[in-house]
Image (cartoon, helix red, strand yellow):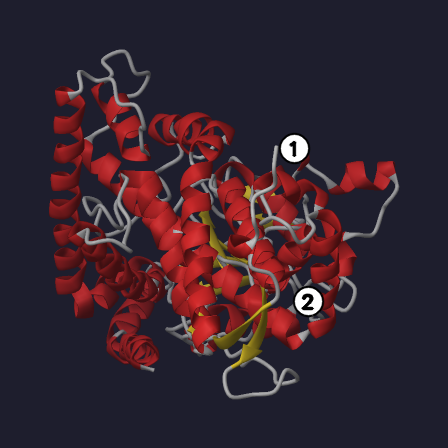
Amino acid sequence: MAAMTYVEYYFITFLLVLTSTFILQYILRRLTKHRTHLCLPPSPPVLPLIGHLHYLSPAAYKCLHNLCSKYGPLLYLRLGSFPVLLVSSASMANEIFKTHDLNFAYKPKSPFEDSILFGTSSFFHAPYGDYWRFMKKLCLTELLGARQLERSRGVRREELERFLRKAFEKAKKREVVDLSKGIMTLTNNITYRMVMSASCSGQDNDVEKCVGLVRESFQLVAKMTLANLLGPLRKVGVFFFRKQLLDVPGRFDELLERIMEEHEERARRDGGEIENKDLMDIVLEAFHDKDAEVKISRTQMKSFFLDLFFGGTSTTAHSMQWLMAEMINHPEVFKKLREEMDSVVGRDRLVEDSDIPSLHYLQAVVKETLRLHPPAPIITRLSREDCKFGGFDVPKGTLAVVNAHSVMRDPEVWDNPDEFYPERFLVAIPREEADDKMGRKGQDLNFWSFGGGRRKCPGVNLAFSLINATVAAMVQCFDWKLDGAEYTARANMEVTPGVTMSMAHPLLCLPVVHFNPFDTPAKDN
């Protein structure tokens, strides 16, 4: 509740303080008014001075969804004087991420360009150019691609087994498991071990500091997102939390610099031959490589590690929490998935990564969860040039806001879009229709849970791998009952206000053992 109050407080404060600024801006605009003949997309009723700001609320994706439900899937908004293109249909999202992908491959500039959290040194916020392309290539080939997935298989397995053993201890004592906290710890452990060979389940104080700073950073991101919606006047908005914007990234910078120096010292001590390299070792090698096609800075490295901490922990953990909540609310889905587990894997060993391709219903359940609860419900891009979009004129510098929450519930694409129905992903379609539906590299052009186009999240394969393996093990090993309730009770699906889609209430469950792989004697060879 404290986090929600924070967001609402700053949101309301922004609107009140900016009124005088809008008045001055309106007067200046009237003095320099010029006629335009642009054919802009339709727009809801607008107010003088503030434009469409009065439609916004702290739950951004919800208010934007309601706006498009009333006025249409493609809207032109004016937040103050800042132009915004609101996209809320699958067909329009395809235009953004496919037809106009290059033009919308840019991000809004931050008033804190030198910040490792919000500046252009961040991979996610960097302008589309040589540095961004180099880091994307490094991600796909060395950091988050198939090679690294195989390299980190042991780490992911160890942490998953540690998570399950704790759940078995709770089941034995008939104690409740806080799945929200437990799953978050699991994703934290895997991410930090992959990045810098350290776990937050041990005595590593540096990791605990990183986890705490990530929490503080998420609050700043929520505030910064609201401030960015104010366009050219965002500096007025950030005035209220400027001290935090300098303090949190500064502490992160100092911590990461020390950890990087320790990795460099280890590399020198080992003569550069490190047997088990983590992601920090790989990025540092690229930093010290004199022949690298692009020279990266230490600030860019730190920003990249922050990107990994953000993308590899909370978003993945939130997706798994939503999935478990959906299965608690739909016991027939849980039962069907359990039957698939018993049929494909059996009850004499723990499910493995190699089993996932054969678990078709599991994959459907994961996709359906991500459809209803996209990790990034709001995706922003900036147009580099004037363009024609959906038959309308879109001026250069327009902020495109793709509401993935609405896109993934587009009734033109999805039957009964608000229903949790994994079977929709098992329906076979003709080859010609499949070719029309799938875009470059087999990307489903109606499925945008991880963004799309050039700036699609590079960690999507790791996220799917982790979610599939964890959920499969949780279903194989336990029945899950809500704390203090009958099996027929439903999980609370309320969403926390803000820019991410997280559960407002912890998911407290009593685990009931179905199969314990750690009690199963090993088979004789």
> Residue at left 75%, top 43%?
437
Question: Residue 336 is drawn in which quadrant?
Answer: bottom right
Question: Residue 502 is drawn in which quadrant?
Answer: bottom left
Q: Amino acid at mark 1?
A: Arg
> Residue at left 67%, top 64%?
409
> Residue at left 38%, top 73%?
50
Q: Which residue is mark 1?
A: 440
- How far across and down, in percent of the image, does residue 200 sit? 27, 54
- On-image quarter of the N terminus: bottom left
Label 2: few (<14), some or many (≥20) within 10 Å?
many
* 2 and 1 marks in contact (CB < 8 Å): no
Q: Nearer the viewer, mark 2 or mark 1?
A: 2
Question: Which is nearer the eye, 477 or 24?
Answer: 477
Q: Amino acid at mark 2?
A: Phe
Against 509, residue 369 (above or below) is above
Question: Which is nearer the eye, 50 or 363?
Answer: 363
- On-image quarter of the C terminus: top right
**Helix, strand or loop for disc 1:** helix
- How far across and down, in percent of the image, does residue 186 sit? 40, 56
Is 171 left, or right, of 328 in this rendering?
A: left
- How far across and down, in percent of the image, does residue 480 sit? 57, 73
The outermost residue toward the right is: 430
- How far across and down, in percent of the image, does residue 340 sit? 74, 55
**Helix, strand or loop for disc 2:** helix
State the CA–CA distance, disc 2 to disc 1. Answer: 33 Å
Against 187, residue 48 (above or below) is below
Whether residue 331 is visible to the viewer of this picture, yes or no, is yes
Q: Which residue is mark 2?
A: 334
Question: Which is nearer the eye, 48 or 63?
Answer: 63
Q: Who comes first in sequence, dot 2 or dot 1?
A: 2
